[in-house]
Image (cartoon, rainbow, N blue to C red):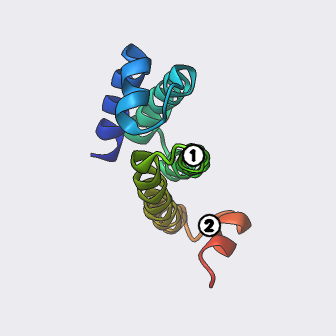
Amino acid sequence: MVGLVTLGFGVVLTARPRRSAAALGLGDRPVLAGAVGLTDLVVGTGVLCGRPRWPWMAARAALNLVLTGCYAAEANRPDGNRRARTGAVAMASLTVVDATLALALAVQAGKEDGGVEPPAALRSASCP
């Protein structure tokens, strides 16, 4: 399901970057929307078809983290874009969800591969 949603956003952002940027609260940043759309097309395909899947979910979490910063920058403009503030919170939340899923998939893949541990960077990300 995550892969299909990501692909859907990728198609819309790529096909209509100016309209998408405005609708999502990214202001007048169609190049950003188009770049995110292309990235979503790649990541969405990887989530659906890639094996193992955890690196693709980790890439999605990283993209979400970058988008959180873009939204925060837009929200801090003098005109105070309320939609961008909501976008920043939403993307930060999705970053946590996607990173958690990436970690769970990495652990699952490790168990299926005979106990291979996920990379240290992923393991340390899960520790408080």
Most distant residue in the bottom direction: 128
Q: Nearer the viewer, mark 1 or mark 2?
A: 1
Q: Position of residue 79 (x, y in %)?
A: 52, 43
The residue singled out by tag 2 in the image is 116
Residue at 42 percent across and 31 percent down: it is 45
Task: Indicate the amino acid at tag 2.
Answer: Val
Give the label on residue 84, or none: none
User: In this view of the protein, can residue 10 be seen by the observer?
Assistant: no
Q: Position of residue 11 (x, y in %)?
A: 35, 22
Q: Position of residue 114 (x, y in %)?
A: 55, 67
The Cα–Cα distance between marks 1 and 2, rounded to whole angstroms, is 20 Å
Q: Is residue 117 left or right of residue 101?
A: right
Residue at 52 percent across and 65 percent down: it is 103
The quarter of the displayed image where residue 113 is located? bottom right
Q: Position of residue 124 (x, y in %)?
A: 69, 74
Label 1 SS: helix
Task: Indicate the amino acid at tag 1.
Answer: Ala
Q: Nearer the viewer, residue 12 or 98?
A: 12
Q: Is residue 106 left or right of residue 69?
A: left
Give the label on residue 59, or none: 1
Q: Nearer the viewer, residue 78 or 116?
A: 78
Most distant residue in the front direction: 78
Q: Residues within 10 Å of mark 2 (few under 14, many from 20)?
A: few
* Quadrant of the frame with the C terminus: bottom right
Check if mark 1's residue and mark 2's residue have beta carbons within 8 Å. no
Most distant residue in the top direction: 15
Residue at 43 percent across and 19 percent down: it is 18
The quarter of the displayed image where residue 14 is located? top left
